[in-house]
Image: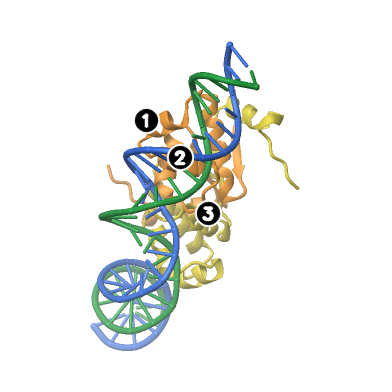
Chain colours: A orange, B yellow, C green, D blue
Amino acid sequence: MKITIDNAASIGKVVRASRKVQKIRQDDAAGSIGVSENFLGKIERGGESVQWGKLFQVLEGLGVRVLLDVPESVAAYLNEPANRQDKR
Amino acid sequence: MKITIDNAASIGKVVRASRKVQKIRQDDAAGSIGVSENFLGKIERGGESVQWGKLFQVLEGLGVRVLLDVPESVAAYLNEPANRQDKR
DNA sequence: GGAAAATCCTCGCAAACGTGAGGATTGTTC
DNA sequence: GAACAATCCTCACGTTTGCGAGGATTTTCC
């Protein structure tokens, strides 16, 4: 199910819910994800000044996917050959 | 249209695409959103250590919505009265 | 209701943040 | 290809980051 994020802080609730549903403690989740317990706690309490890369790491670690909802024109722009950068 | 974010840095491409489609320069977009030009540039170049709250501000300013894809159990958890916090 | 579990808070640390400004580099237009 | 537009990079600044650790507080369980 997809949840819309209305404000930056509310992502913390989803992070906590995801962890609780898996019945994992904060310190254990933090350890396996590779961030500090303090940091995970800060996210869950709605910290907005956390680094995006580390937040994304936490989301991934908890199995939460991030999607962006954009106008069709943006998707079309991204699919133009000139704007692609397929490197494999 | 919904775009899945596979890594933290790729959000920058979507930000740039959203801005370009609206035919706005970096400095103008940054000004109207309320962040520095340097900062917006950093996001667009894939900066991962940017603050989530400010990144979210940029996304909002460009009309990009953030969604999280979670298991049904997480959504159910969030809807339990004990875990809700409706304050209006 | 008390014990245990879990979470939160404060500290000090080294590193890096976002900002404004100025100049360098790259991209676009004619 | 030159001129202009747009973006990138470096600098210095004051502030704040994430971390590990230890103790305080809150929550959960029996």
Q: Measuring 49% from the left and 68% from the top, which residue is drawn there?
A: B30
Return the residue at label 2: A40
Q: Is residue B68 left or right of residue A81?
A: right
**Within 10 angstroms of label 3, few (less than 14), some, or many (20 or more) residues?**
many
Q: Considering only vertical position in the picture, is B69 above or below A77?
A: above
Location of the N terminus of chain A by quadrant is: top right
Q: Residue A74, how many percent across, how many down?
A: 51, 54
Do residues under tags 3 and 2 come within 8 Å of each other at their CB atoms?
no
Marks 3 and 2 sit apart, C-alpha to C-alpha, by 19 Å
Label 1 to label 2: alpha-carbon separation: 12 Å
| Amino acid tagged 2 | Leu
Same chain letter for marks 1 and 2: yes
Disc 3: which residue: B56
Element under label 1?
Answer: helix
Image spot of residue B31 (x, y percent):
52, 71
For discs 3 and 2, the disc positioned in front in the rendered view: 2
Q: Amino acid at mark 1?
A: Ser
Q: Secondary structure at mark 3?
A: helix
Nearest the viewer among B62 and D29 is: D29
The secondary element bearing badge 2 is classed as helix
What residue did someone put label 1 on?
A32
Q: Which residue is drawn at the image coordinates 71% and 30% (left, top)?
A: B81
Q: Position of residue C14 (x, y in %)?
A: 25, 55
The lab-note entry on whether marks 1 and 3 share a chain reads: no
Identify which amino acid the numbered label 3 is placed on: Phe
Q: Chain of mark 3?
A: B
**Residues behind callouts 3 and 2 on a single chain:** no
Subunit under mark 1: A
> The C terminus of chain A appears in which quarter of the rendering?
top left
